[in-house]
Amino acid sequence: MDAVQLTLEQIDLIRRLVNLYPQHMALVTTADGIEESHRSGKLASLIGIEGGHSIGTSLGVLRTFYQLGARYLTLTHTCNTPWADCCKVDEPGRVPHIGGLSHFGTLVVTEMNRLGMIVDLSHVSVPTMLDALATSKAPVIFSHSSAHAICNSSRNVPDHVLKRIAVNGGLVMVAFYPHFVSCGEKATLKDVVAHINHIRDVAGVDHVGIGAGYDGVNLVPQGLEDVSRYPYLFAELLESERWTEEDIAKLAGRNLIRVFRQVEQVRDQLEAQGMLPIDQSIPPEDILGRSYCRYSGPRT
């Protein structure tokens, strides 16, 4: 409830933090901006929106968030939206509401391509993943998901989707949350390495990254307690002799920057073709009579 307002307040907070600590942080809205921040020794602060409920089923709100600096949107969080199924529907005994993306959901992805906003598929159902990949003209990301073949959590990415990510040019950024790594409450650095290597084996070294999730978890793997442990993770990979320093640079951020640039290139191509903002509302029948995490309808 009140997701649009809450998201606006969080964007306001990010902007105030950056303004309060300009010597340490920079608000970044472009791929070039990430590299510029890195060269200046600052944290590159990107605004992402986790959950399509935040747009309130409005493409106008989506466009406004982009104007405020948001550069990626996770299509769902842990509940369905009126236009996309979340990963929960893939769990045993659950029934999909839509079966992927609705027609309006494909319009959300198309408008994100036009804007230059990265489509994030963490938290979505497998049919939603496939629909988004079929719709998007730009590479997509999984900002914090791991390999389903190693841990069969519904939050992870199955191999057939990993293969599609390679074709799409996208990126899977490995989450460190033990429940997504070992399917239990305990995990280790070596468990995370197994996920990174599996995604590399299936999708390729250009399509794997670090998602971690330190901002939103209460459990972490042994040996990866916080960001200060990243060098130990990279050292473990380098010891295997299959990883080069160039590969590690891709994993650590260059893959994400490449995806971001390609999303910007698709935006520029669509603008050159004269594509206009999509002016369409979600059909009322897609909202009424359903329970979703969104701001809508009477309250009890």
Image (tube, rainbow, N blue to C red):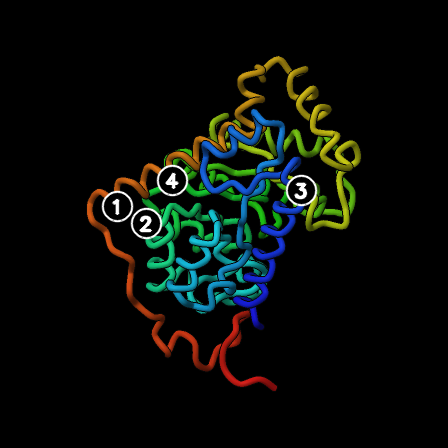
Task: Work out whether mark 2 precedes mark 4 in sequence or the reverse, and give the earlier one.
Answer: 2
Q: How many residues crowd mark 4 within 10 Å: few (<14), some (14–19), many (20+)? A: many
Q: Are marks 1 and 2 in contact (CB under 8 Å)?
A: yes
In three-dimensional space, the C-alpha distance between marks 3 and 2, rounded to whole angstroms, equals 32 Å
Residue at the spot 74% in from the left edge and 47% down from the top edge:
184
Report, in whole angstroms, how far the alpha carbon at label 2 lies from the one at label 4: 9 Å
Label 1 secondary element: helix
Label 3 vs 4, first from the N-terminus: 3
Q: Residues within 10 Å of mark 1 (few under 14, many from 20)?
A: few
The numbered mark, 1 or 2, whose residue comes first in the sequence reads 2
Residue depth check, mark 4 versus mark 1: number of the one nearer the observer: 1
Which one is closest to the eye, mark 3 or mark 4?
3
User: Residue 126's x, y, as percent?
Assistant: 47, 52
Secondary structure under tag 3 reads: loop
- Which residue is located at x 36 percent, y 71 percent? 282
Q: Amino acid at mark 1?
A: Glu
Q: Reply above or below: 31 against 236.
A: below
**Badge 2 is on which residue?**
114
Residue type beneath disc 2:
Arg
Image height check: is 75 above or below 38? below
Q: CA distance from mark 3 to mark 4?
A: 29 Å
**Secondary element type, mark 4:** helix
Q: Nearer the viewer, residue 22 or 61?
A: 22
**Residue denoted by label 3:** 21
Task: Give the answer, above or below, for where 87 lies relative to 32.
Answer: below
Where residue 281 appears, as percent x and y from the top left, is 33, 70
- Mark 4 residue type: Val
